[in-house]
Image (cartoon, rainbow, N blue to C red):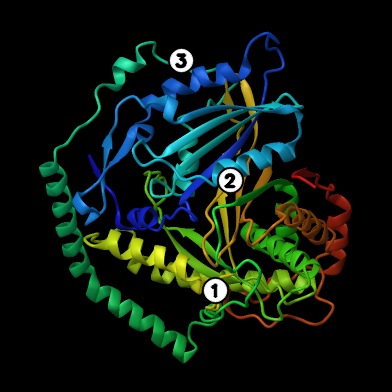
Amino acid sequence: MKNMSGLDGVFLHLETPATPMHVAALYLIEPPADRDRHVDFAGEIERQLLPRLALAPFFRARLAPMPLQFANPVWIDGGVPEFSCHLRRIVLPAAAGFADLEACVSGLHATPLDRRYPLWELAIIEGLASGEIGLYLKIHHAALDGVSGMALAGTLFDATAEPAEVPADWRQRVGEAEDPGLGQRLGAIFRHTAAQYVKLARHLPAGLRLLSGMVRSAGQGTAPGMGQNLAFGPKTPFNVPISNARGFAALSLSLAGVKEIARRHEATLNDVVLALCSGALRRYLQAQGGLPRKSLIATMPVSLRPAGNTETTIQATLTLVRLATHLADPLRRLHAVHAAAGAAKALTRRAQSIIPTDFPSLGIPWVVGGLAALYGRSGVAKLLPPLANLAISNVPGPRQPLYIAGGRIRACWPLSIVEHGLGLNITVFSYCDSLDFGLTVARDAVPDVALLAQALTAAYAELDQLPATAVADGPVKMHGPGESVVRKAAAEASTERARAARPAVHKKTST
């Protein structure tokens, strides 16, 4: 039995039929080149995954609720999963294209998980004309975040084309399901709550001193740039009440190409990812006839994990970053994004010690669940100015290829959460030599997500062609972390451009 953290519980109680709170990944698997054509490759994937899923405690964990839901449930071991409730085999129409796979995944992502069982589902998708297999894995966000999710993939997949050995007696090794009585569950929650109150009391004075110092520094101007991201965003089509209808597009860009753009402009990889999203949003909104004069703002998760920590619980916070979408010049936009992202990181680093990921949960299910239901029904998302216009997340993944049933995983595209007033989520995984972008949307906010994916491709081409020279319209006013990001001479820039190979753009989206 394991207690659920306060932050994990918030994601559980925020869930409504229109806003499922799960995250997912779409893996594309190439069949082994030497496989027997008469062998059912999808069936072999299923055969190898079942024991791995059962042997991993995470995939056996299910919720044991508290009476009247007065506090967070606890996690208990459910024994060997009932795979008929978790696993689906889907065959697409004959000679299906990638757009058919995206549409299939969009539908799967729209349905919430059944809380009577461990909070995950797996779909093996066949029928692509390429012969590849799609693997869609959905997990509730109350159970993990992006970093722990990528680590969890290591329990399912192989590091080489040679499948790992699985014990034949794996069902016996799992053992019986855990069945704690009500007294045990109540005892666990009250002990956990008492420990959280003690921890809160112990850290409160230091936290208040740090918070007071941050406010004082910002007011005196000794923390430059810290306040530049703290403002409401403009109203956009993304910021509306939503239904459960979802859209999804997948796109892969060259990791080496994006790193080269970052190197030429003395920026970080994450700066370039944000600038790519900014350029794509400009194009998309211009095409829809509604680019705001004010910059869009993204909410971006920042990991709070110590190095090496892969515990399956949420250890992250959210920060806000201005995307400079109001700037037409792409170089000025990149510089401004660099400055804003640097300020956001500085603020998060300073506040990290007072950001809680666990806290007492008594009464939280009633409060959070009630507010979530009220927020969706009232349509208030249409009236209030958005604190953020979209969510962007960048999660580092493995640099070496993964395999299953001897087949190489060619790409791993993430799918994430959209909310009332926040109908667009762009999440990025780095895998091997590519950046895999997953664009998850509410159809009420983005009716045709393929147009946004095309705009992202164009934004990459724009930055890729940009020399490392000063901006044409003069320097962008920046402070703190963003100051003087480009100091390269024009001669060096031209030399580097001649030497650099043009990176390929691997587009995987509907048109």
Q: Which residue is mark 2?
A: 414
Residue at x-position 36% and y-position 42%: 115
The answer to which of marks 3 and 2 sits earlier in the sequence is 3
Residue at x-position 44% and y-position 68%: 375
Residue at x-position 67% and y-position 47%: 435
Rate crowding at label 2 as few (under 14), some (14 to 19) or many (20 or more) other CA atoms within 10 Å: many
Q: Is residue 40 above or below residue 224?
A: above
Residue at x-position 48% and y-position 28%: 87
Q: Is residue 281 above or below residue 417?
A: below
Rate crowding at label 3 as few (under 14), some (14 to 19) or many (20 or more) other CA atoms within 10 Å: few
Please tell me the numbered disc located at residue 343: 1
Q: Nearer the viewer, mark 1 or mark 3?
A: 3
Q: Nearer the viewer, mark 3 or mark 2?
A: 2
Q: Amino acid at mark 1?
A: Ala
Q: Amino acid at mark 2?
A: Pro
Q: Say whether residue 335 is visible.
A: yes
Q: Amino acid at mark 3?
A: Glu
The answer to which of marks 2 and 1 sits earlier in the sequence is 1
Query: How far is mark 1 from mark 3, CA to CA?
Result: 48 Å
Query: How far is mark 2 from mark 1, CA to CA?
Result: 27 Å
Residue nearest the viewer, comparing 471 with 161 = 161
Residue 403 x/y as whole percent: 59, 26
Residue nearest the viewer, comparing 112 with 333 = 112
Please tell me the numbered disc located at residue 165: 3
